[in-house]
Amino acid sequence: MSTVKATSSVAQQGFRPGHRQSMGAPTEKPKEGRKTLRRLLSYFSPEIKYVIFLALVVIVTVLASVITPSLQSRAIDDLVSGAFGQIPHILGIMLALYLIHGGATLLQGFLSARLSQRVIYRLRGELFSKVISLPIPYLDSHSHGDIMSRMTNDAENVSNVISSSLSSLFSGVLTLIGTVAVMLSYSVPLTLLTCVTVVLSVVMTRVMSRLMRRYYLRRQELLGSVNGIVEEKVTAIKTVAAYNLQESSIEEFTQASDELTRIGIIADVIGNAMGPLMNMLNNLSFVIVAAFGAWFALRGMISVGVISAFIIYSKQFSRPINELAQLYGQIETAVAGAERIFSILDTASEDKSGARELPITEGVIEFKHVDFSYVPGKQIIYDFNLKIEAGKKIALVGSTGSGKTTVVNLLMRFYDIDAGEITVDGENIKDISCDVLRDSVGIVLQDSVLFTDTVRANLKYADPTITDKKMIEAAESSNCDKVVAALPEGYDTVLTGAGANLSQGQRQLLTIGRAFLSYPKILILDEATSSVDTRTEQHIQNAMVELMKDRTSLIIAHRLSTIQDADMIVVMDHGHIIETGTHAELLAQKGNYYELYMTQFAGNAT
Amino acid sequence: MRILLKLLKKYWYFAVLAAGFMVAEVYVDLYQPRMMATIVDDGILGLHNGGVSDLQLVISTGIKMLLVVLAGGVCGMLSGVFSNVTGQNYGNDIRKACFRKIMHFSFEQTDDFSTGSLITRITSDVTQVQQLVMQMIRGFVRCLMFFVGGTTALLSLDVSFGVVVACAFPLILIDVIFVVWRTNPLFTVLQESLDKLNSIIQENVNGIRVVKAFIQEKTEARRFDNANRHLVETQFNVQMMMSFLRPVMNIVLNIGIVSIIYIGSIQVQGGKMAPGAVMAAITYISQILNGMMMLAMIFQTLSRGLASAKRLEAVITTDPGLEKLENGYTQPQQKGSVSFRSVSFVYPESGKRVLRRINLDIAPGETVGIIGATGCGKTSLVSLIPRFYDAASGKILVDGVDVRAYDLAELRQKVTVCLQKSELFSTTIRDNIAIGDPKASEEEICAAARAAQADDFIRQQPEGYDTPVAEGGMSLSGGQRQRIAISRALLKKGEILIFDDSTSALDLRTEAALYAALREQYADVTKIIIAQRVASVKNADRIVVLDNGTIAACGSHEQLLRTSAVYRGIYDSQLKDSEETEKGGQA
């Protein structure tokens, strides 16, 4: 029985690649691979029905393929001994078994395809949900190309391996167990000898696996950075063209790509070496069995017939081992990919919690002694105090980098404050569920982000059930109806490349329309009209007066005409509030705002 | 496929080596069973020794066999090395060729393909083609040897066995053709749905703030789910079809074995054949089976690889959107003049006419402001100067030479555009500025940053000029990003400097200081400034008022205030009660 144990440890080895890591190499995170694999396997537990069904089918296949060789040798024996009458009968059974085998293999293909696609569908979906629920600081500080690479390359890798290796793994292990059982029934000492190979292959696999893992991980990383370069350069194609950066970008890409190739070759060469190495070990095992078998036979310990049968089975024994060794390389890749996927899945999601689920009714915003820094030690906002009454229009002005957009980031809970508190309707925003908070805020950002979808879907982004009538109203008040009118199919035009062929100002108008349509209690416009001409802006503002009645608006702008009629203007400088008041009050103060205002008339331009 | 094949040529000797070593490996694979048979028949069973085992023979043949296998293994590994070198270097070449091509795409071509799709092509599709090449080199040789070797040996045993092969072969062929025919179109769909998925991921990652602000995580997850489901369904369909290959081949060839035993039994019964020949025939037919199996695998890779190859070929064979005008080039005489001669421009994608017969001459060193309503064609107008797009009719001259006659790099060296959207790369601030002139000294970089009013805030960053810019410049404010982009533009020292609304996020004071610096330090540079604020262009030599794709008025601020109603309207909308305030301020 001990042999069976030894053998099944080979099987385990086949899908527990990280096992070896516990033996040394501290840099490679001991046991990580094993944990990753266990976790990957846990994705199969909801599919247990498929797994069981697949296992049954595999058992049928294996049985058929174990029985047929013995039938075949019986037929040959009959042929040799001249018992020709028996042959058609045996052949009939063989034929039936072959058909069963074929049918089972087909079913096995279907099932493993279904199973693997279901698993990968869930894994990918989970990953995407995770990515969009990651905190903003994480996404701001990680390469988008690399995140994308994990979602596509790594996920596909895992998917491919699961689908290609799942049933081979099953049948390999089963065949192995079945064959060992038969072998044991023939001769225990010879079986033990065969297992010398098993020990050798375990050792070898472990050595190889350590090498492989390192290169596979590195390869996936490089793939991520190649992806990152493509993403960055293609997205910024205008800058690349404007600065003749083609050659230097190509050079950068070439370096990454060459390195990927170099590592890829090493990784695959090591992976491919497993096959021939295993083949050699199998032959070694054969020679050992043959030599000792002959020796035993000469001493009369076993019959010659046993050796011959044994040899047939030891050949059968080597096939699954070979397959498992081949699979090993693939599984290593999958584990490397899975590891990168899980590292994203393990990143804490954005904390959206908050006890308050009731919608915001007033829109009173208050900042109390708020301190904030993006990077520890480099404070951006200092002791920020500001109360915005419901239904008022507040403007934030100040030099660039004075922290205006940061205030928005904090109010939206994109970033968490270091000290102080921000309240909305008297409630600390940390205690308001993020969804409720964000639902009550309509926001138009500096970067006008649109999606590759119809204009209609983009405008109705907040709520697709909004009627077309309301959409058209909002489009008129945000002046984007003129943009839409110029598009070939009006509201049904699909914005290719996320609106890449619209002008910045046109995109801004669409994003304003989108924000209007969400009927927010609080509206934030962060440089939302910077690329819109002033007359159009005027029109939008007039429309806003009606729209924002009883609603709070917070406007960030450099163009003072945008904010002149605000109820209160807050002048910021280096994270501090330096002046507040209405346009008239601030002008009368002849302070900072006054100076800023006067630059509009001074001969500043060129 | 011609271009992709041409790229492969470079590695033909590696491919030949890989194939050669594969032949050696297969030869050993085919030879080894014979040694095994000697060990079994003569060594152990002692067939020629009266049934007595011969330990000596077992050991000597065993050692010989191990050596042969070792040699075979080495050959196999070498074949692996060479096929990897071929395949991966080839993949690398395609990847680089595609990237090079993409870098020279015109903007519309990039939009046509979409960023997401380009990324899929450069990663996933290249991997498929690479896989195809490696499989072809190794698998094809192997499969062919097994198949041809097996068939020849089988026929040499007894021609009647040929009937079996002759019957089995068409059946297998039909199976393969059927599967390939059904799956081929699916692979294109597969890569396309991968594109779609990629695009959704990209948009979401880049637009995450909007997704979160509108609490659309669930909707986006649903959108992704649709794409994901579609991809998974397609992949499943492909695998379903592929599942038919193996079992059908298996059945056909197993029936072949049954038939061979049956035919063999008749032949043996008739005394026309020895039983050993039947056993050998079974071995050979298994070899043929093996070859066939591999063929099935190859066809899998082949159809997927070909679909990918087509997509890559589409990238590589895309003609550069902007062709150079032959014979139009003469040595430019001036430095910094721009002329529009009856220029019209139609947006390539929508076919919408954006500019109508524009005529405009800008003298070297002149400062021209451009102002006008959103969507009136300001950006389009200046995009024609560095030839980001081509005019539909009319021509644009830079320094008296048609822009189409220039070498693009030369033209774009003369013309610097500071874009509306400041695109920063994820490297240090210094490197982002140095893009303007990679050879610039530290001093020059700082000087450009000073003129762009960026030096102060850069020095306040944790590591000054060496501070890394986070993904897309998110760690910097909009105005800071713009100023880095302006520093970059100033460093480039072009003859013509175009500001495409690139100071929109700057506060007025910073903007004023920037323009003052421009006036002093870059006096002889021709400046074209698109702006929304009248204040930004007020002091330009001339202001062009664009309206609906035509020049509505052109002149100095004072002239336009008097003569142009459109300009007057813009001015009023911005300054409202400003006149009084101005007077009040001065009083």
Image: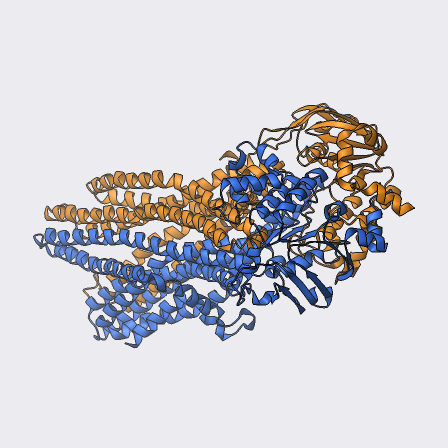
Image spot of residue B44 (x, y percent): 25, 65
Q: Quadrant of residue A68?
A: bottom left
Residue at x-position 56% and y-position 34%? B318
Query: Does residue B11 appear to the left or right of B420 in the view shown?
Result: left
Query: Does residue B458 appear to the left or right of A154 in the view shown?
Result: right
How many callouts does the rendering have?
0
From the viewer's side, name the closer residue of A62 and A38. A38
Residue at x-position 53% and y-position 55%? B215
From the viewer's side, name the closer residue of A419 and A465. A465
From the viewer's side, name the closer residue of B433 and B501. B501
Q: How was the colour assigned to the protein in this rendering?
A: by chain
Which lettered chain is shown in blue?
A
Image spot of residue B273 (x, y percent): 16, 47
Q: Quadrant of residue A178?
A: bottom left
Query: Does residue B419 appear to the left or right of B240 in the view shown?
Result: right
Please identify the residue farthest to the right as the structure is shown: B587
A55 versus B123 height, above or below: below
B42 versus B152 height, above or below: below
Q: Is residue B87 visible?
A: no
B378 versus A309 height, above or below: above
Please identify the residue farthest to the bottom as the structure is shown: A2
Q: Colour of chain B?
A: orange
Please identify the residue farthest to the left as the structure is shown: A85
Query: Does residue A423 appear to the left or right of A577 in the view shown?
Result: left
Q: Is residue B184 visible?
A: yes
Image spot of residue B551 (x, y percent): 74, 27
Image spot of residue B117 (x, y percent): 52, 43
